[in-house]
Image (cartoon, grey):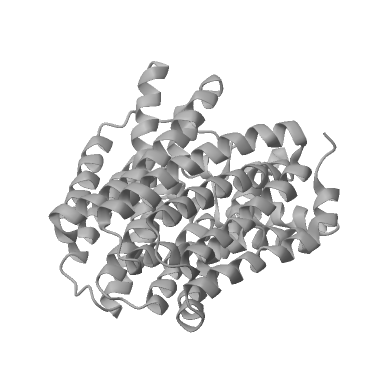
Amino acid sequence: MTTSHKLLWVAILYFSEGFPFGLVFDALPVYFRSHGVGLKEIGLLSLAGLPWTFKFLWAPLIDLIWERKTWIMACQGIMALLLLLLTQLPSGAVHPALWIVVVSMALFSATQDIAVDAYTIGLLDAHEMGSGNGIRVTTYRIALICAGGVLVAVSGWVGWPAAFTGAAGLLLLLACLSTWLPASGGSDAQAILAAPHGSLSIGSVIERVVTPLRQFWQRPGFLAIALFILLFKLGDMAMGPMVKPFWVDRHFTPLQIGMVPGTVGVISTIAGALLGGTLTSRWGIFTALWVLGIGQATSNLVYAGAALLPPSTLLMYTASVVESFTGGLGTSPFMAFLMCITDKKQAATQYALLSALFGLTRSLSGAFSGVATEHLGYAAYFATTFFLAWPAYLLLPWVRRWIPKQ
């Protein structure tokens, strides 16, 4: 199989990986708030993101049961059916059936992520990894734009049921395409996610998770580093679930929400990440962490100003672009830090564990965001998220010790 053929499949698979994530975190908050769901309930729905945080726990099962290709097709098909079911549920309140649908959507999306990542590791040769990663990041972001931008905008024209039905049709189309996925190899030495079928016993699976964690625990200052990972993007993550409801409550149309925070915002994040990567290479990880982190935190005050001042379309657009751009700036050195502190021999599992800590911040802070916003109001809550970002800076002395000298 040619490299271009492989990269085409990588593009399709990572579009499929990003699309349901965008649905859950970008489209559904707009959908729920547009139908009168309370901020408390929307915030609590952030807990639906926990499967993405803890997906490493059942990742080995993807290699022990069925083919990865089968997992991918099954997850895509089930997610399509869940979206169709969502259109049949009452939309004005959060009830058990809605919780089941949203959590199931997240669970099967996270499981698809595991299968796609493992499949891609086996599909690409070493010399193709660089191009593959570029395609992966690009198509994943395009999927976020389609789910959180285009879909939301389209809902303003055709209504949410038709928009979700179209999204379900897209997932079914992806499931059909996945039936033609070529055979993929994989090496147990590459990552736990890429282990050959039947090669992992339950004991070895546990050992593969415990050993990398034990390596971290034995290093001086690990608790401080774990707290830093939990706290560094706390301000961003705590504000995130309330941004789209804020746009709805400011009476912006689905088209405006889809085009500005849903599309321009994602593009701004990409631009910020690219610039952040360049500055991280130039300044070093430690300097970039605190300098770009300050910008990341300060941008929340722009949204606080937009909430405090009289409604202004220009100010809202500015807040969206600034917050997204600085979020991308701060993400680059943060991800570089996570990569540099992992042991290369245990990189896959250790990075998954560190990412789980990061994902836990998103879910837990989001769960409390609605309650806090209902009590404080948007302006005070957005200002509070600015201060939530600062405790991470108390841990910088330990962070410096963990970063290899550049």
For image coordinates 60% across by 47% down, the residue present is: 331
Residue 209 placement (x, y as % from top left):
63, 55
Residue toward you, 348 or 184: 348
Vertical comparison of 29 with 141: above or below:
below
Residue 88 on image: x %, y %: 15, 68
Query: Within the image, what quadrant is residue 257 found in?
Result: bottom left
Q: Quadrant of residue 380?
A: bottom right
Rendered view: 349 above or below 36: above
Residue at the top extreme, as displayed: 2
Horizontal arrangement in the rendering, residue 7 relative to residue 327 (left or right)? left
Q: Establish if 237 lies above or below 115.
A: below
Which of 266/116 is in front? 266
The residue most toward the bottom is: 375
The residue depicted at 50 percent of the width and 34 percent of the height is 121
Q: Quadrant of the C terminus?
A: top right
Quadrant of image for the N terminus: top left
Asked if residue 149 can be seen in this view, the reply is yes
Q: Position of residue 25 (x, y in %)?
A: 40, 59
For this view, does 139 lie left or right of residue 31? right
Q: Residue at x 44, y 34 (%)?
A: 138
Horizontal and vertical percent position of residue 23: 33, 55
**174 to 39, vertically: above or below:** above
Q: Is residue 400 left or right of residue 345?
A: right
What residue sits 80% from the left and 56% below the top? 396
Observer able to see residue 54: no
Farthest-out residue, front: 310
* Depth order, front residue of 257/215: 257
| Number of dots carrying numbers | 0
